[in-house]
Image (spheres, rainbow, N blue to C red):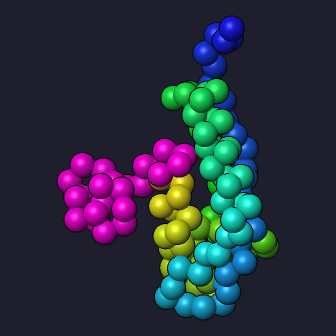
């Protein structure tokens, strides 16, 4: 039997990014198959157990975060969005980036949320 609904925040999480974080103007994300499977399991579990009441924090935003390497890169500029990560988080964890909002259909198609 489920307990009464309560808000839950999944603290900072991420997986090792093996991409070359020094390359500029490119998405350098490279995850292992094991890490992709784990993230998929985590997304499925949180959706099933927590439903709409879930929130989460990806570790980390900045590129010099060590082994996860962040949502932006490379470590020299922090200007290039790592779209592989953003698309995965949107598809599997319910991330709703600003460019997926109403009125941004061309961006939504371009970045895979339409």
Verify whether residue 113 appears in magenta. Answer: yes
Say if the magenta span includes residue 34. no
Residue 37 lies left or right of residue 53; in this view the side is: right
- Determine whether 26 is above or below 55 in the image: below
Residue 97 on image: x %, y %: 42, 55
* Residue 43 x, y percent position in the rendering: 61, 43
Seen from this angle, which residue lies furthest bottom? 23
Q: Quadrant of the N terminus?
A: top right
Specify whether residue 96 is in view: yes
Q: Is residue 110 left or right of residue 41?
A: left
> At 36% from the left edge and 56% from the top edge, which residue is drawn?
113
Q: Is residue 68 visible?
A: no
Q: Residue furthest right?
A: 66
Q: Residue at x 28, y 63 (%)?
A: 109
Q: Seen in the image, is 91 located left or right of residue 34? A: left
- Of 109 and 41, the residue lying toward us: 41
* Residue in the picture at 24% in, 58% down: 104
Q: Where residue 34 sits in the image (x, y, percent)?
A: 74, 61
Does 87 appear above or below 102? below
Image quarter in which the C terminus is found:
bottom left
- Residue 33 sits in quarter: bottom right
Nearer to the camera, 42 or 85: 42
In the rendered image, the vertical position of residue 71 relative to residue 114, given as above or below: below
Query: How many numbered discs sit on the rendered protein?
Result: 0
Q: Is residue 45 left or right of residue 88?
A: right
Image coordinates of residue 91 in percent, x first then y, are 47, 51
Residue located 60% across and 29% down the image = 48
State the image quarter where residue 41 is shown. Answer: top right
Range of residues picked out in magenta: 91-114
């Amino acid at each position: 039997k489920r307990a009464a609904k309560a808000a839950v925040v999944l603290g900072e999480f991420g997986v090792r990014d093996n991409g070359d974080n020094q390359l500029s103007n490119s998405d350098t994300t490279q995850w292992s198959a094991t890490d992709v499977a784990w993230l998929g399991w985590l997304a499925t579990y949180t959706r099933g157990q927590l439903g709409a009441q879930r929130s989460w924090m990806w570790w980390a935003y900045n590129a010099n975060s060590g082994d996860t390497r962040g949502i932006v890169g490379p470590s020299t500029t922090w200007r290039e969005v790592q779209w592989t990560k953003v698309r995965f988080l949107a598809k599997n964890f319910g991330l709703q980036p600003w460019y997926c909002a109403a009125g941004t259909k061309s961006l939504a198609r371009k970045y895979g949320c339409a």
